[in-house]
Amino acid sequence: LTSAGAGAPPTFAAAAAAGLNVITSSDISSGTSLLNNDGNFSSTYDLYYVNMSKVKISSNGTIFLRFNQSGSGLTAGYSYAVLGYDGSGNARSANSNSTAYISFTSNAMMAGDSTHNLSFFITDPLNAIGTHWKVAYGQYGGWTDQASNSALVGTFSGGYYSNTNALSGFQIGTSNSATFETGNITLYGVKTT
């Protein structure tokens, strides 16, 4: 129900459809080391889903997540845990309680023709009431430069212990001077009702 102005009867506006609603989608430009998605969170959604597919990187390295506040990346104060398995059944894990980013994988990702896919949720990024964790969690599938260039699958969870400011977006970057060569990234708003 929306206002049509003083003296006019209210009108009904269509609500966002339940489920996944595409907000942004783009191919990743070759040579890019940091993807910045900012200004796309709104009060329409309190849950967001990010999917990255067919990702290739220029050299072995990690892909990581940072949150933005007021358009700038937050570069400290993260905590994360990753648990995965390689193609030989070996458990692979990584964690940190005080780091500059949230790692998606437990080992460095393999460069070259290897493709990587990952997806994750960001919960309640606009919540600016009190000091609380801003959380992301998801899964990864691809190839590791460890364990004889083996397949790697895993899950991760991480967060940033925020001040009272809302998040304005997120950044996805690479380590070890790697850059993205190809891929696609799509941001969805998740409407649950």
Image (cartoon, grey):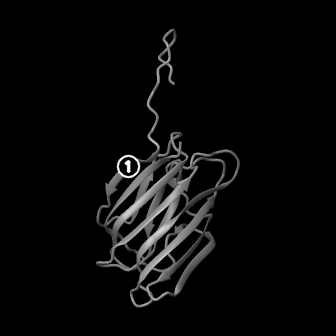
User: Left or right of 3: which side holds 61?
Assistant: left
Residue sticking out furthest to the right: 130
**Total numbered badges shown on the rendered structure:** 1
Q: Looking at the picture, tell me which residue is in the foreground, 20 or 48.
A: 20
Residue sticking out furthest to the bottom: 148
Residue 165, percent across and down?
62, 47
User: Left or right of 123: which side holds 177?
Assistant: left
Residue sticking out furthest to the top: 7
- Secondary structure at badge 1 equals strand
Image height of 104 relative to 72, above or below? below
Residue 68, percent across and down?
52, 54
Q: Looking at the picture, tell me which residue is in the foreground, 138 or 107.
A: 138
Amino acid bearing label 1: Thr
Residue 7, percent across and down?
51, 8
Residue behind mark 1: 24
Badge 1 density bin: few <14, some 14–19, many ≥20, Cα 10 Å: few
Residue 40, percent across and down?
45, 46
Image height of 158 relative to 49, above or below? below
Q: Residue at x 66, y 52 (%)?
A: 163
Q: Residue at x 33, y 77 (%)?
A: 114
Q: Residue at x 66, y 48 (%)?
A: 164
